[in-house]
Each structure stands twice: as structure tokens, then as C-alpha cells.
Amino acid sequence: ARLLEDKLSSFLQACGDFRQVFQIHAQMIINYLSQSHYLLPKIVAQCGTYSRMSYAHQVFSQTHRPNVVLWNTMFKGYAENEFYRETVELYARMHRQGIPPNNFTFPFVLKSCAKLSAFREGTEVHSIALKMGLIANVFVATTLVDVYVSCRATTSARRVFDEMSVRNVISWTAIIAGYISVGDLALARNLFNQAPEHDMVLWNTMLVGYRDSGDMVKARMLFEEMPVRDVISWNSLLIGYANDEDLSSCLKVFEAMPERNLFSWNGMLGAYANSNRFQDVLNLFRQMLESKLQPNDASLVIVLSACARLGALDTGKWVHSYANNNGFKNNLYVDNGLVDMYAKCGSLETAICIFDEMPKRDAISWNAMIGGLAMHGQGIEALGFFEKMLKSREIPDHVTFVGVLSACAHSGLVDEGLQYFCLMSNEYGIQPMIEHCGCMVDLLGRAGLLVEAADFISRMAMEADSIIWSSLLGACRLYGNIRLAEYCIEKLIELEPSNAANYVLMSNIYGAADKWENFAEVKLTMKEKRIRKKPGRSSIEVNNSVRDFYSSDDRHLMAEVYDILKGLTEVLKSAGYEPSIDSLTSPQGEES
């Protein structure tokens, strides 16, 4: 029998897939070795290797008297496959059956307690390890520190750490990470300085601590102190500057990196996106592909979002094709990005087609469709999607209601908008945010209910921002309410004293009402404060690149485009279109 066990054991070690493990287990059963204490742990270990813990559980449950080795193999398999709750429950069963653990038991059980932040279970294991004299084991003690750190119980973690007779760099890293997690960077740095040994993990732990606390000065100083840096160190610094919205420093770090991985590229893509540098996102993505690095779904989502913001439909279509050809078809995150991109670019039929073909949807999927339809004036259709969302049992979030209220505003559905605004808080417990309030002011303003809009602003739980006051000011212009417009401009000047658009809009309102003295006063104020109106800008996608054109600008390298635009203007005029310029000039012909 022993010869057969040795033979099957060697076969197990040579297994190339789980099917072979299953066949060897079948041979064990046929040859009356189904209870072999020698082979069963090896079978269970292979189950863990191939992430087949359900089969491991079946094998374990059919074992009459599993020994501690088999128990530990189960703990290891569960923990390494992230079945943390099952690990803790199995340990409780072991304890109930009176089977004594050993020093190999506790690291896997404690790791699971740490991942679950299971303080009570962790303290119980701590007590048993203490009684068995196993707390002196550096691996057990270090994992116990991890448990208390995960539960933010730094006092208990420090007590275990201080009682350790032997500490390694992992122990020091664990306690330092604990103090970082509760925001005590000073004590963490003090311990860092005391640590007798510093490996790359410890250096990066301290660096990430400074980064996540927002202290990029100390993060940079520590980075400069590092004797050796790896790609994680560089990425930590890059992400820190990105979070700090310091795009210049972020770019310098990216360009100086001796090695870049996927996180480096995604970090820089995200930094550009957060700074509204969407064309740079597309340019960097092309460089990423040229570097032969395979992007992941996060990369594609950032790029698709940039396409959506730029209106770069052709580039978005190319990214769509790339996604389908590189294993991202039916990826939920990429599909959501595609729906959002097509919807925002006005290709609503394609957006709906992709949405309908998605095998799985989440709230983001529905939000993309609702928001895209609302954005393009398809309010009724947007509300139809919202009703379908509710029928699908998907719970709407605050973003959903921004889309719904925007749909009502763009379609003049005042009563429906008021109902949805109440539904949001009464039915779904979503407290109105500034974006929801902005939609309501826009809804009331577009409908000419200016007094109601002003009253709504006065009853808001938060201070109205410039977007809300600008929305109401625009409605005042539309309906000629000069008195309320003057009140709006006062608020806007308080919030944005140098924003030329507010002054221009107010001067246009005065001009439309033939109040030329007031018109001149606004112009004089702009001149005295040296406030200049920014030229109007339009964007067009040419050869997968978005180009900007400014009013009265003929400096572009492709100047012939202006001739084409001029020709298009003549075509529009010949078709009967005449731009309204009454509100843009004074009697003397002064541009506003």
C-alpha cells in the first residue's frame, strides 16, 4: 500500500490540471486509500492550487478522522483562495471537536480574521495561542498584529508587538501600517526610524502613508531618501501628485520613471482626465499601445470617458473595435464606458444597441443611458429607461436622479420633475445634493417659474453655487426679468468676481431691454476690473484628433478649414438661417 501511496503522490506532484487530480482521487477510492492520511492533504492542497475548494470540502467532509495536517491544509486552501469566512468557521468547528491546533494553524486563521476585521474571533484565537505558548512564534505574533491593525485596535496590536521576543521586518511593517491606518503618521515614522532593517515593502508602506495623508512634501523627502526604488515607489509618488491635482509634478515623475507598468500608465491617464486634459488622455493612450503594453478595462474606461467629454466619436469607435478584438467584449466596465461614450456623443441608437446586448447591467449602465438621453433632449425616452430600471429591481442612486431631473428640465416636465425630486428622498433616502438642486432650478427656470426657482434656492439646505445662479440668470434673460437678474448677478460676482461670462450675460439682458445706460455701466465695470471675455470656442474631430477653433482666429496651421467653415456659413444662410445678434451689440455696434 505504501508503494502505491508513493506512486500516487508523485503523480499528484506532476499534475497539470485538476482533471488529473480528480482521476488520482478516483484511483485512491478504488484502491481503498480514500482515508489515507498521507495522500488526503496532498489532494486537498491540489484543490487549493486549482481553486476547487468545493471539492476539497467534499473530500474533507468524507474523511472519518482528519488529522491536524489535513485541517491545516484546508485552512491554507481557504485562506489563499480568499474564503476567509469559511476559514474562521472551520476553525470554530475544529475547536468544538477538541482537536488541538499547532503553530501552522494560526497564521491562516489569523490572516482570515484580519481580512474580515473579525476582532472577537481574533481575540479568541489570541487567547488559545497564548495558552499553548505559540505566541512566541514570530509568524503567529505578526499575523496577530495584523488582526488588531485591521480592526484599528492599535493599542492591542502594540501590546502584542512589544511582547514579541523576536521581530522581523514583517512585524515592524505590520505595526507601522497600523499606526498609518489610524492617521498617526508621527508615531509610524518614529517606529520606522527605529526599525533595525528596512526592506522595499517597509519603505513603500511609509511612502504610501504620507501619500494617502496628502503630505506630498514628506512623501517626496522620503522618496529621495530611499536607497533603492521599485516601480511601486514611483507609482506611489505619481498617484500622490495626481490626487493632489499637481499635474506638472505628476508628469515629471512619469517621464523620469525608469520602468513603467500598467498602474503607471493608468495613473497618468487618470491624472490627465482629472485635469480635464482629455486630448492628452488620447495621445498618452496611443503611446501606451506603442509601448506594447496591454491596457486593461480601467485604461479603456478612462479613454472612453475622454472620448465622451471631447465628443470624439470616431476615436471612440476605434476604442470599441480595439476592445472587441482584445478580449474585452461583454466586460461590464467597458460596456458601461461604451454606452456612456456613444450616448454623450449623440449616437443614441448605438448606445441603446450596446445596452440591450449587455449580458449584465448595473446602476452605472442605466445611469449612462438615462443621462445620455437627457443630455440630447430625449426626456421622455430617458424617463422610460428610468421606469425600466425600477422594474429590473436595480436601485437608483444619486447619479440616476441627476439624469432623471435633467431629463425633466430639458423636456419641460415640471410636475414630473417635482414628483421625482420628492421620490428621491422619500422612497430611496437620497438627500438632495447640489447637482439635484441645480436641475430643479433649471427645470423651474426653463418653464418661466422664476419666482418659484428663486424660492427653491432660498430653501436649499446648502449654499447655491455659481452654476445654479448662472442657470437662473439665463432664465431671467430668456423671460426678461431684469430685477431678478440683477439679484443673480450680485450673487455671481460674490462667487466669481472675475468671470467675464456673468458680466456679458447681464449686459446682454440690459441690451435686450434697451437699457443702454446699464449696459454701458457693465462694460465700464469690466474695463475697470480688466475683465476680458474669453473668445467662443468650437471643437471638431479630424483624423482621430480633436481640434479647437476660436472666434475670429485665423492662426491655425490648417487655415483652409476656416474657408470651409465660411462656406458652410454661406450654405446655412442660403437655406434661410440667420443668426440672432440683437442681444450681442449695443446701438453703437459695440460687441458684448
Image: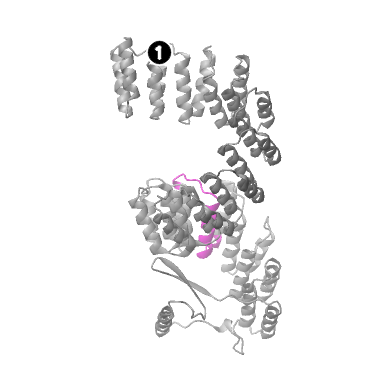
Q: Give the residue number, with chain letter if any, for mark 1.
A: 37
At 63% across and 74% down in the image, what residue appears?
Answer: 500
Of the residues shown, which amino acid type is indicated by label 1?
Answer: His
Relative side of 400 to 292, left or right: right
In terms of image quadrants, where is residue 180?
Answer: top right
Instruction: Answer whether residue 412 is magenta in the image.
Output: yes
Q: Residues within 10 Å of mark 1 (few under 14, many from 20)?
A: some
Judge whether 212 appears above or below 108 on screen.
below
At 70% across and 68% down in the image, what residue appears?
Answer: 491
User: Over which residues does the magenta segment extend?
Assistant: 391-415
Q: Secondary structure at mark 1?
A: loop
**Residue 59: % across, % down:** 38, 19
Which colour assignment does the render follow?
A: one colour
Pick the quarter of the image with the C terminus.
bottom right
For the residue pair 364 and 312, the one nearer the viewer reads as 312
> Could you tell me how many numbered marks the image carries?
1
